[in-house]
Amino acid sequence: MSTPTPDDPTTTTTTTTTTPSQPPSQSSSPRLRVQTHHCRFCNHLLLATTRSIPSLPRRKSPAKDGAIILPLPRDNSTDDDEQSKHQKHYTILLSTTIPDRKHTLVRREDGFEKRLFLRCGRCRVVMGYFLNEVHFGGMSSTNREGGDGEGDGEGEKARVVYLLPGALVETGVMLRDEELERVVKGLDREWVGWLEG
């Protein structure tokens, strides 16, 4: 066997070059885990999110329901180069969550609240609500600038949903009977506290 040289045409050399298929910034960022949530009463799939629902903030007094505040993505959001490097949290209310046709007035100690209830598509139990834009004083005019001027609350609905405590159960918990029983008992205590409070 001869050693390959540039002058010898009978020997061939093969060179390989490696190019990274993805930029390093994309491969190093971890993907956010998607969690799915079901109706606590009928196990119907209602919600998918990358956020941890138990760690989200809750409504404070004078709102006695202690609803969990779940941010929703904006419809008109644009990705900047800096922001696209980091994966954003995302939440999808599935088509199995049915909003009521009309708002409901809820009496509170400090006045009234106009809520659009979200119901489970199977058992029709209320699992959360949107607040009407009248509760967000300065935001209603900015929402109408890009819209049709009627201000039906769509701008706010695309930003946050309030989930009633104890209305949802995570899919992973449903698979483990002992944990499901413990979680359901905890949810029951939360509901009883809400009714007594």
Image: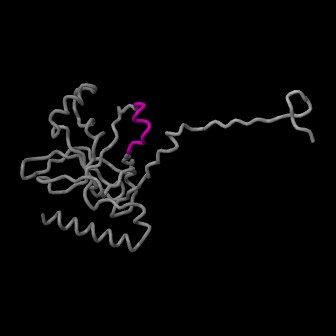
* Residue 87 is a magenta residue: yes
Whole-percent x and y of residue 186? Answer: 27, 69
* Residue 26 is a magenta residue: no
Is residue 71 depicted above or below 54 in this figure?
above
Q: Which residue lies furthest to the bottom in this view?
A: 178
Is residue 126 depicted above or below 72 in this figure?
below
What kind of colouring is applied to the model shown? one colour
The image quadrant that residue 150 belongs to is top left
Magenta stretch, overall SS: loop
Whole-percent x and y of residue 157? Answer: 27, 41
Whole-percent x and y of residue 123? Answer: 33, 59
Of residues 159 and 39, the one nearer the viewer is: 159
In the displayed structure image, the side of residue 35 where residue 107 appears, left or right = left
In the displayed structure image, the side of residue 94 where residue 107 appears, left or right = left
Identity of the residue drawn at 10% across and 47% down: 112
Q: What stretch is highlighted in magenta?
A: 80-89
Identity of the residue drawn at 39% across and 48% down: 94
In the picture, which quadrant includes the C terminus?
Answer: bottom left
Identity of the residue drawn at 28% across and 55% down: 127
Q: How many marks?
A: 0
In the picture, which quadrant includes the N terminus?
Answer: top right
Whole-percent x and y of residue 89? Answer: 38, 45
Is residue 140 depicted above or below 182 in this figure?
above
Of residues 53 and 97, the one nearer the viewer is: 53
Is residue 10 depicted above or below 93 in this figure?
above
Of residues 66 and 83, the one nearer the viewer is: 83
Identity of the residue drawn at 76% across and 35% down: 15
